[in-house]
Amino acid sequence: MGGTPAVEALDVAVYTVPTDGPEADGTLAWDSTTMVPVEARSDGAAGTGWTYGPPACASVVGDQLAGIVVGREAFDVAGAFHEMVAAVRNAGRPGIAGYAISAVDTALWDLKARLLGLPLHRLLGAVHHEVPLYGSGGFTTYDSARLREQLSAWTDAGMPRVKIKIGESSGTRVERDLARIEEARAVIGPDVELFVDANGAYGRKQAVRVMEAAGRCDVRWFEEPVSSDDLEGMRAVRGAVRADVAAGEYGYDLTYFRRMCASGAVDCLQADVTRCGGITEWLRIAAVAAAHHLDLSGHCAPHLHAHVAAAVPNLRHLEWFHDHVRIEQMFFDGVLDPAGGTVRPDPDAAGNGLTLRRDAAERYRRDRR
Ligand SMILES: [Mg+2]
């Protein structure tokens, strides 16, 4: 491969952005979101990837992964992925190390596409021109006015499906959950699909009772009704409710996703390209899902999913997640337009089509740990 450019540098940063109000789901509350972008440079081109995770992700990139990637042939994304996974064996791949690998892998794919002068979705082999979205937010901390405002903004933009959080305070506020489901249905009208996400807050029978009580609201998607570690429980709920049961956002390797699919726990698999190992692994997870006759839905980080999602035949949709949309629109030039409830990756721009706006990001920079 003489003459093939090498990766010259791998830069990493940490940006922590306060939320635009208190946010919580069934099992977690937060007031800021941290993005860890990685830039891989070669031959005058720069590829950008990122993860949403703790600042420690940046240390893993710098301390454990940069030495594997810098100096390597820039087109050798598969080799870099393989070696990164091997290198974190003792650190443990799930969690921070997996997030760090994801940020580097997505940067290397973007770099490869830019060096070749191709849009990333065309390099990956696009099978969809448009990628369906669902609006996602509806935090349990929202009051009625804020919930209505957010849902209306999505439906006004033509979003055909929207998701709210339920399972408030670890499943101890079921009456409020039900009132919010009813309110959401009233705001979006009969023709928009309503999704809910309990983030594992309910018990098995409690989850079934909630769906029965919300029966007239026609909920179509019930994400993590119980802990996604409780595969038997999810399977039991799946058999008892009309909504599709979905999970997978905490998956870090193929074995996790194979187990989830094979157990019959889900109607649709989810995976997060910023956590699971990047584009390399997201494509393989899509194949695992396909072998079980399941669709795949992209979890969060919509601008990092758009190109690889377009390359997956059994794609269902991407999550247009309020927090990440807000940050990605603030930090990047070249963001996608969600009008009509789909995004269309740019057929002409090289790579992922995004350029980090350092001036916008700089005020949120913090030191890596
Ligand atoms: Mg979720």
Image (spheres, rainbow, N blue to C red):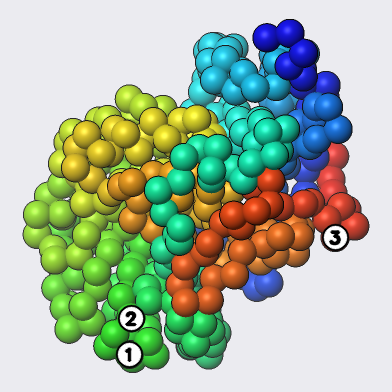
Please give the name of the residue rendered at 77% of the width and 52% of the height, measured from the top-left corner.
Answer: 355
The answer to the question of whether label 1 and label 2 lie on touching residues, with beta carbons closer than 8 A, is yes
Residue 350, numbered label = none
Name which of mark 3 and mark 1 comes first in the sequence.
1
Please give the name of the residue rendered at 46% of the width and 30% of the height, measured from the top-left corner.
Answer: 281
- The image position of residue 189, as x and y in percent, is 32, 90
Q: What residue type is labelled 1?
A: Gly
Which quadrant, please, contains the N terminus? top right
Query: Which residue lies under the disc numbered 1?
Result: 189
Front residue of 236 and 105: 105
Left or right: 284 as drawn, with respect to 138: left
Q: What residue type is labelled 2?
A: Val
- The image position of residue 337, as x and y in percent, is 59, 70
Query: Which residue lies under the disc numbered 2?
Result: 192
Q: Answer few, some or many: residues within 10 Å of disc 1's Cα (few below 14, many 20 plus, some between 14 and 19).
A: few
- The image position of residue 211, as x and y in percent, is 19, 70
Query: Which residue lies under the disc numbered 3?
Result: 360
- The image position of residue 328, as x and y in percent, is 68, 59
Front residue of 94 and 13: 13
Which image quadrant is residue 173 in?
A: bottom left
Name which of mark 2 and mark 3 comes first in the sequence.
2
Please give the name of the residue rendered at 65% of the width and 36% of the height, measured from the top-left corner.
Answer: 113
Query: Which type of secondary structure does the marked residue at label 1 adopt?
Result: loop
Farthest residue to the left: give it: 240
